Image (cartoon, rainbow, N blue to C red):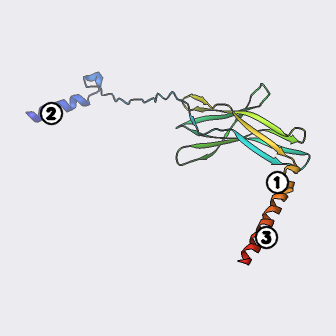
Amino acid sequence: MKIAVKVCFLIFLLLPSNLGGITITTFSPTFTPSDDIGPSFGDVDNSFADALQESDVTYLTLELYVMVYDDGISSVIGSYKEQNEMDWINCTLDLSHVFETGWRSYVGNGTEFVLTTEYRTRIWDVKYYACDSMGNWNVTDVVKYSYNLLLSQENPFESIAFYGALAIIVIISIIGIVFWRKH
């Protein structure tokens, strides 16, 4: 008798719901992360570069580079302007490298510019934006990228001070050798 009850119960479960069976529904929870924080940036600092004068005009490119961390980065933008200008120029950066730690480096070229003997220093204001796959943005503080042209007379190997210091070192060395030989 007990077997007949079990069989009837099993048949009842297997019957379609419109014939009196039990409808079994599956539940698949949907997980939506509640990430409301934008990507993190590595150290973004002021940058200084010197270029030796090789001709009357030295051609350079503003190089943009930033480290960003987030589980899903969708966009990284470098924004720059010359220090005294008002308008910012945006440049979408390309993924350069993914590190084992999860950090990613992004690079891009900003504008090309020249340094001349009359216009020896160019200073750029630079900031970076990053957006993650959840639509959260983050932005860095503004930093300065400074490029300076060293004129050929500023080359340390061509200066009087360099040769004067070299002469003093040679004289002291000769005196030291002579003194050491006497003892």
- Alpha carbon separation for disc pair 3 and 2: 111 Å
Q: Earlier in the sequence, mark 3 or mark 2?
A: 2
Residue that appears at 79% across and 27% down: 85
Picture quadrant of residue 18: top left
Q: Position of residue 87 (x, y in %)?
A: 77, 25
Q: Secondary structure at mark 2?
A: helix
**Amino acid under label 1?**
Pro
- Alpha carbon separation for disc pair 2 and 1: 98 Å
The residue labelled by disc 3 is: 174
Within-10-Å neighbours for mark 2: few <14, some 14–19, many 20+ = few
Q: Earlier in the sequence, mark 2 or mark 1?
A: 2
**Camera-side residue of 180 and 6:** 180
**Camera-side residue of 124 and 23:** 124
Spot the residue most to the bottom. 182
**Camera-side residue of 19 and 100:** 100
Spot the residue most to the right. 56
Position of the C terminus, as image quadrant, is: bottom right
The residue labelled by disc 2 is: 6
Instruction: Using the image, determine if residue 20 lies above or below residue 39.
Output: above
Q: Secondary structure at mark 1?
A: helix
Picture quadrant of residue 147: top right
Q: Which mark is residue 156?
A: 1
- Alpha carbon separation for disc pair 3 and 1: 24 Å
Q: Position of residue 12 (x, y in %)?
A: 21, 28
